[in-house]
Structures are given as structure tokens and as C-alpha cells.
Amino acid sequence: MKPAGLVPLGALVASDIRARLGLRREASLATCALECGAQCCRHRDMVVFLTPPEMRDLKARAEALGVTVPVRHMPRRPGSTAPWAYRLADTGGVCVFLDQATNACRVYEHRPRACVTFPSAPEAFCLLWPLPAPPASATPITPHKGETHEHRE
């Protein structure tokens, strides 16, 4: 009899093992566009910091596509070489370069470094590097008023 909750090792592929361990997966069209739905490109709080050359390049590509990419100058970011910021909140929470029908980036080959290296830390909405699930012991059981819980082995 197989213990409940266990999956035969043969049923797991490498990406499942990495995901179950909370390790970073590789970005790909299948993972980001098809499985995830490009959530990073639809995340209202996302900010993409741009170098001056990236900002000029994105502005030109946006113009060629007939869209506007609003950027803000952020000169007071200490130690940063990327003083420009594109906030998705400024475009309704969706990146202007996202093809919403396919979830594919329309400037993928020329996307900014911030997009190439995303995520740099675990993110709740990202399949590439998800936040680890909290341990079962993280939620203490609080007895109702007048009750006590005994621990029995």
C-alpha cells in the first residue's frame, strides 16, 4: 500500500522536481506564456527599471508597434545604472509589449535586462521561482474560548 500524498518518482519530470523543491525553473514560452499566462507582464505593481539605452530602444520599438510606453526618470536611485522606470500601473497593469491573445512578448529578443533576469527572488505569482509554501507548523492552532488542546503521541 502506497502512503497517501506520495507520487511515484517516475511520474515526475525534472521541472516538477525543481518546482516542488522551490527551485528556479528556466524561462520558456511554454512555461511563461502557456502555463503561467505571463503574470509578471500583468502584475500591476511590477516596475521595470531601464538603462538609458534600454529606455531609448523600448520607446522606438513602442512607436514602431503603435503603442506608448510611459517611463519616469528616477535619478535618485543610489548606485543604480538604470534611472528610468516603466511601471505597469501606468498602462493599466499590463505591459504594452504583451500580446494578450498569445501571452507572448512582442519585443522578446530585445527586452530589457530586468525582464531577462526576472525573477531575482521568489515571487508569489511566478512559476519560475515561486515562494516556498509555508510549513504546516507555521499556522498555530488556537483553541476556542474555554477549550484546551492536548498533545498526544
Image: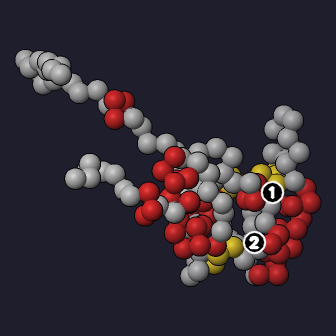
Q: Position of residue 61 (x, y in %)?
A: 83, 75
Going by the numbered disc 2, the residue's amino acid type is: Tyr
Kindly tell me whether residue 65 is visible in this rendering: yes
Q: Position of residue 3 (x, y in %)?
A: 26, 48
Q: Position of residue 12 (x, y in %)?
A: 47, 61
Query: Which labelled disc corresponds to residue 113?
Result: 1
Residue at (45, 62) in percent of width and height: 10
**Which comes sooner in the sequence, label 1 or label 2?**
2
Q: Position of residue 99 (x, y in %)?
A: 63, 78
Give the labeled residue for mark 2: 108
Kindly tell me whether residue 59 is visible in this rendering: no
Q: Secondary structure at mark 2?
A: helix
Answer with left or right where residue 77 lies relative to residue 35: right
Q: Residues within 10 Å of mark 2 (few under 14, many from 20)?
A: few
Q: Quadrant of the C terminus?
A: top left
Residue at (38, 58) in percent of width and height: 8
- Give the image's coloring scheme: secondary structure
Q: Quadrant of residue 135?
A: top left
Residue at (23, 27) in percent of width and height: 141
Q: Residues within 10 Å of mark 1 (few under 14, many from 20)?
A: some
